[in-house]
Amino acid sequence: MDRWRARLNRPRDAASLAVFRMLFGLVMAGGVVRYFASGWIDRFYVRPTFHFHYWGFDWVEPLPAPWIHVAFAVLGVASLCIALGLFYRAATVVFAVLFHYVHLLDVTNYLNHYYLVGLLALIFCVLPLHRTWSLDARRKPALRAETLPAWMLYLLRFQVGLVYVFAALAKLGPDWLLHGQPLSIWLHSRTDTPVIGPYLDEPLVALAMSWAGFLYDLTIVGWLSWRRTRPFAYAVVCVFHFFTAVFFNIGIFPVLMTAVATIFFSPSWPRRWVAWVAGRAERRPGAAPPARWRLPGWGAAALGVWALFHLAVPLRAHLYGGNLLWHEQGMRWSWRVMVREKNGAVSYRVRTDGRPRERIVEPRRYLNREQEMEFAGQPDLILQLAHRIRDDLEAEGHRDVEVRADAWVSLNGRPSTRLIDPGVDLASVEDGVAPAGWILPAPGGPPRHLRSYREHLALRPERR
Amino acid sequence: MAHIERTSEPRRRAPRVLAALGVLMLLASCDGGDGGGDGGVDTLAGRKREILGAVGENVVLPTLREAVTAADALESAAQAHAADPSEANRMAAQAAFTDAMAVWQRAELMQLGPAGMGGAEGAVAGGMDLRDEIYSWDATSTCRIDQETVEDAHADPEAFASEVVNVRGLDALEYLLFVESPENTCTALSPINEEGTWDALSEDAIRQRRATYAHTVAVLVAQQAARLLDAWEPSGGGFVGELRTAGDGSELFSSAQQGLNDLAGAMLYLDTQTRDMKLAVPAGISADCTSETCVDDLEAPFSGTSKDHVLANLRAFQALYLGGPPETEALGIDDLLVDVGSEMLATQLAEAIAAAITAVEAIDGTLRAAIEAGDPDGAVMDAYAAIGEAQRLFKVDVVTALDIEPTGFGRVGDND
């Protein structure tokens, strides 16, 4: 145990952590600017009249305009402060609080990479990443430290590595590995892409890319960690994320992942680069870090608990059985990145006051179009809106309110099927972590095979 | 002791910097924008362009040409009615209106390009907001029309064109030509009632003013319809050409898929407007109707043509989907489904649309009559369900099979 602790406390050059901090701050600042420029703050948080809450966080509501804009502005400033290492302690806490606040406002805005950002923000609150190459260190020389204990580096590597490993495990299934879905669907709509576009609807291309994505996720951490393969691996990271950015609407994800992958580099890589650019010999980092950053016994235990927790959370999904992509119980916070294409149509049938007549409530009465698009494939959100409809009807004085859902969903190109048992009164169903009996089983059989246009022409030569 | 890794010697940097710049330029050149570069139809992108062009030329353009012809006829009939507001002229104007509206109800499903939304959010490529200039339902306000009638400032169409859209479109025209009552539809607190300006008008004056007003509106509708057609015509704004070259030379569409997204977004009118607003709300199927039924919310409460509107919407949806009327050889979205191997879905949706048309046709008499009679044979409910089936297949299955993100309905933010 002591040997492990000694390993964790070994001094490591803090340069790569400083660069990691800078890149993270800059990417986040860019993300905030993007939110302002795209008008998403109004669209996602000001205009909607209904927000989907996370379980246990019903009390989190968006600030009214312009305060929500102010919150984002502060988030942007905090991001820049993190990048510069200026008022770092305050900036990381402000960033973490505001980022989690924004993230908790509406489940339909959940993204895996926002979850990663949230976790990294929490870690930043603990780690003293402003001790090297920061304005804080310049202002207060006493803060300066050129090395930090290895556990800080390992913690960040663990957190980033988890994303890749679980993203790979999520791809272990017939849809991804045998049918090339949902990539095949997505690539069919990208045939305008210059040069390679005409080949993107070939089933073999989708299958090859699926396997490449799987192997990339599964092994990239190893390649990045091994000094000999690192340059090639990082080139692959750049190319991979460049193409994901071109093909898919995934916002800051490619930039973020390209930035955070640097955590697997040698801790001294920035010094080497600076030396290379400046044309001088690399300067070695100075003394060992302050003793107070050495990991005590309880600290090592806390790290262990943190690691176990973040291994257990994604794995919880397997407790539910069935097709997770269909019922989505345990889907969030399990790094299932880009593994499903789901489209749905939902409407509610309501019955009140013991009358036999049912009336239809369309979700658009409550949701904007983006929310409607996102919620249609997520059973817990369908249940949540059913409860809101029930509450509204009861507030209007109706009694014996029953709410049922007609929810049709297509998963990875399969013909649309009912997602929710149409006979179950959702008004009387409570949300929770237990397996949900009101979600119908996933459709069996393989997804629809999408033909390439070349195959089509071969079948119908008269089209040529 | 500090952990030290291998140190590096100073090196010559120029070749590496140049190489890095080269890679960056190469990457920058592949910006995923314009120019699939395949030109022909031997690729899926080319096929999409071919279908978009065909739908534009064979479905949208003929509809808009017909709409302009009908609007011109309506303008002439309204002019005759304004000159002599006799019952015969009024009936002639009403007939011309019904003809024009029948065509326009097909054009309602074609709100891509110039008829569609301009601006930023939910905008379609080339959107000029011309739809609302021609028909602003469901923003219609008969009270505002009554107020304009009292104001009597509609002699000059050019000046009147600056009024809000819901007093100068086909919806206003329906009210002006079909309303029988010499009363107004404003509340007692409205200035025209409080100040007695409405009561000061004789029935003849009201009839005359409505007729003059109707003519002005007809002139404006005809102008806007012509503007819309011109924006589509190859000899005018050439929007149809933009569709045909989407992603391959088009200035508006960076990809053929974007054209498909705009087309699908326009077709979802069947879901949000036809099925929901035109059928479910008036029939009391929707909880948005808070009484037993809401016949006052029918789309065409004065002309009694609401059922025809629903049918016209469905036929336009069918034409856009099949590329023309059924049983004709035409390129439509169904062909694209066949191309990617979803023949069964293509047939299923074609059958569902035909079934929906049959179901609406089965409603006896007018929609108002059927609803007021309590939908005794369940025909309204059947029509609602049949349209629902067609829209579900389109909104879920077709959208998935072709990876469409219908404009105005698709994801706006990021994804992962």
Image (spheres, rainbow, N blue to C red):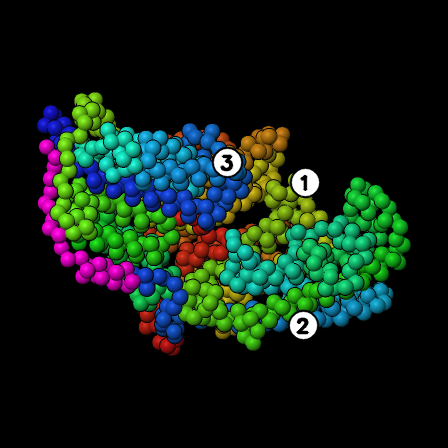
Three-letter amino acid code at the position of disc 3: Trp
Q: Which structural element holds mark 3?
A: helix
Whole-number angstrom distance, CA of label 2 to CA of label 3: 53 Å
Compare marks 2 and 1 and give the one earlier in the sequence: 2
Task: Tell me where residue B189 appears, x and y as whole percent.
Answer: 79, 41
Task: Tell me where residue A172 appears, x and y as whole percent.
Answer: 25, 47
Image-quadrant location for residue B307: bottom right
Above or below, comparing residue B234 to residue A385 in the picture: below
Q: Which structural element holds mark 1?
A: loop
Image-quadrant location for residue B221: bottom right
**Looking at the image, which residue is at 45% across and 69% down?**
B250
In the image, residue B10 lies in the stretch drawn in magenta: yes
Which residue has dot 3 on it?
A67
For the record, the magenta segment spans B1-26
Above or below, comparing residue B411 to residue B15 in the picture: above
Chain identity of mark 2: B
Are there few (<14), some (14-19), or many (20+) residues within 10 Å of tag 3?
A: few
> Along the horizontal axis of the image, is B90 left or right of A43?
right
Q: Which structural element holds mark 2?
A: helix
Q: Is residue A366 visible?
A: yes
Which residue has dot 2 on it?
B69
Which residue has dot 1 on it?
B291
**Looking at the image, which residue is at 61% across and 35% down?**
A355
Chain identity of mark 1: B
